[in-house]
Image (spheres, rainbow, N blue to C red):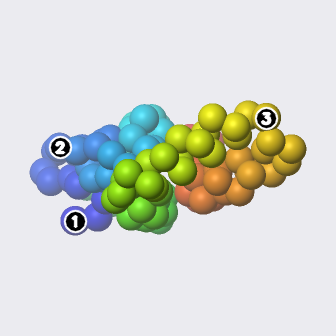
Amino acid sequence: MGPGRSKGRTALVGDSAYCASPASGPSTGLALVGAYVLAGELAAAGGDHPTGFAGYEHEMRHFAEQNRKLGPSNIKHMVMRTKRQISIRLAILSVLGRLPGKERMMAKVMEPIQKAANSITLQDY
């Protein structure tokens, strides 16, 4: 089964379907996009739920994979191993808002998240 996780007349969406890591962060977006795609594919299949589920899983596969990839990278930045790392992180965060070029720094941090969030082109069902 693909990322849509369907069997019989049942299909899962959201965290139960895509298993995104809590560290990756896109749970709500995956759930909303998944629900939209599932409803659209079922409507497009005209009542043929196996075809609708297959279309849903096909449409969601790449999007779910791209969002899952965020987890391992994010966890490396979230979990500090030493007190020194924690102190450095807290010091950086305390001055980040006052640094020149903070917008560029934040854009760089957000780049992988934006890329994953935009890795699907939604159809107009």
Left or right, 31 with respect to 29, comes to left
Residue 83 drawn at (x, y percent): 38, 51
Separation of marks 2 and 3 at Cα, in angstroms: 51 Å
> What is the spatial separation of the Cα atoms under label 1 and label 2, in whole angstroms?
12 Å
The C terminus: image quadrant: top right
Query: What secondary structure is found at the residue carrying circle 2?
Result: strand
* Secondary structure beneath label 3: loop
Closest to the observer: 15 or 121? 15
Quadrant holding the N terminus: bottom left
Disc 2 marks a residue whose amino acid type is Thr
Read off the residue under disc 2. Answer: 10
**Label 1 vs 2, first from the N-terminus:** 1
Q: Earlier in the sequence, mark 1 or mark 3?
A: 1
The numbered dot on residue 98 is 3
Kindly identify the amino acid type of the residue bearing the numbered disc 1: Met
Q: Is residue 58 left or right of residue 7?
A: right
Relative depth, front residue between 99 and 37: 99
Tag 1: Cα neighbours inside 10 Å, few (<14), some, or many (≥20)? Answer: few
